[in-house]
Image (tube, rainbow, N blue to C red):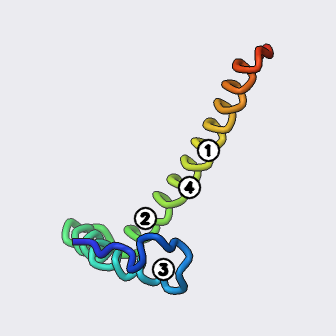
Amino acid sequence: MIDPPRYQDDHDYADRALDCQEAMEPGFQAIIDCMLEVGWTRGETLRALKRLIAADNMTQKENAKTEAELAIARAMVRAGKPL
């Protein structure tokens, strides 16, 4: 089970990032252990995780850009302006 944030309504409390890291640690170790068991090295696994994080960041940025463009297009349509 993954521990939730200590303070659900406060997204800026001082130790929130540390609490998140601690909550993730067991799952992270499980991923590492599983990868090592099937023959991947620790270095390969960590590099792959870094690439996955980078790809997710890029996807999130592109999704945000698309959402912003859609919001602008919707506003223009509501205002009766051509796209």
Quadrant location, the C terminus:
top right
Q: CA distance from mark 4 to mark 1?
A: 11 Å
In the image, which disc is placed on residue 64?
1
- The residue labelled by disc 2 is 49
- The residue labelled by disc 4 is 57
Q: CA distance from mark 2 to mark 4?
A: 12 Å
Closer to the chain start, of discs 3 and 4, is 3
Quadrant location, the N terminus:
bottom left
Q: Nearer the viewer, mark 4 or mark 1?
A: 1
Across and down, in percent, residue 47 comes to 46, 67
Classed neighbour count for the residue bearing mark 2: other residues with Cα under 10 Å, few (<14), some (14–19), many (≥20): some
Residue ID at (34%, 77%): 23
Asked if the residue under mark 1 is in contact with the one under mark 3, i.e. CB atoms within 8 Å, the reply is no
Q: Nearer the viewer, mark 3 or mark 2?
A: 3
Closer to the chain start, of discs 2 and 4, is 2
Closer to the chain start, of discs 3 and 1, is 3
Question: Tag 1's secondary structure?
Answer: helix
Question: Tag 4's secondary structure?
Answer: helix
